Image: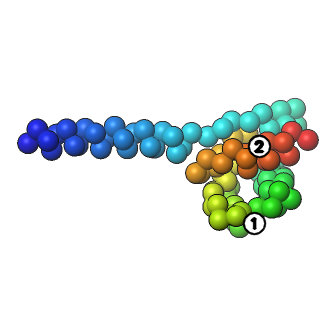
């Protein structure tokens, strides 16, 4: 019985840690002084990623699947928050640089 409780608590802790890491979005100051539509953000993200060698596939209204060299990640964007899942700092930097211009 004690092992079952310990295992349950351990599973809960691991689940919370994994969910916290997976859902941590990176908030970027996307063109702070301009009003930018979701469509414009979509187009900037897609163009920048494709120029960096990523193959972009539409997934949902506010996300795309990015593939490059066997790496697959989902890019999600809403307002000024851009995130990749699983996290891909290289792709995030590419997108952030494009959004600053």
Mark 2 crowd level (few <14, some 14–19, many ≥20, 10 Å Cα): few
Is residue 21 at all visible to an observer of this figure? yes
Looking at this rendering, what residue extends furthest in the left direction?
Answer: 1
Q: Tell which of 56 and 67 is nearer to you.
A: 67
The image quarter containing residue 70 is bottom right
Q: Residue at x 86, y 39 (%)?
A: 100
Q: Tell which of 95 and 32 is nearer to you.
A: 95
The image quarter containing residue 18 is top left
Per the model, the C-alpha gap separating discs 2 and 1 is: 16 Å
Report which residue position mark 1 lands on: 55
Report which residue position mark 2 lands on: 93
Mark 1 crowd level (few <14, some 14–19, many ≥20, 10 Å Cα): some
- Looking at the rendered structure, which numbered label has been put on residue 37? none
> Is residue 89 toward the left or the right of residue 14 in the image?
right
Q: Residue at x 51, y 40 (%)?
A: 21
- Give the x, y percent position of residue 7: 22, 43
- Give the x, y percent position of residue 28: 74, 36
User: Can you say whether 48 is above or below 98 in the image?
Assistant: below
Q: Quadrant for the N terminus, please.
A: top left
- Give the x, y percent position of residue 41: 80, 50
Q: Quadrant for the C terminus, please.
A: top right
Q: Tell which of 68 and 8 is nearer to you.
A: 68
Q: Residue at x 77, y 51 (%)?
A: 38
């Amino acid at each position: 019985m004690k092992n079952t409780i310990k295992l349950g608590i351990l599973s809960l802790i691991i689940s919370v840690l994994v969910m916290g890491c997976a859902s941590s979005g990176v908030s970027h100051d996307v063109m702070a002084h301009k009003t930018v539509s979701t469509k414009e953000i979509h187009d900037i993200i897609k163009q920048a990623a494709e120029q960096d060698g990523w193959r972009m596939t539409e997934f949902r209204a506010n996300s795309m699947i990015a593939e490059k060299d066997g790496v697959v990640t989902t890019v999600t964007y809403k307002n000024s928050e851009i995130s990749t899942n699983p996290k891909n700092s290289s792709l995030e930097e590419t997108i952030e640089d494009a959004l600053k211009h």
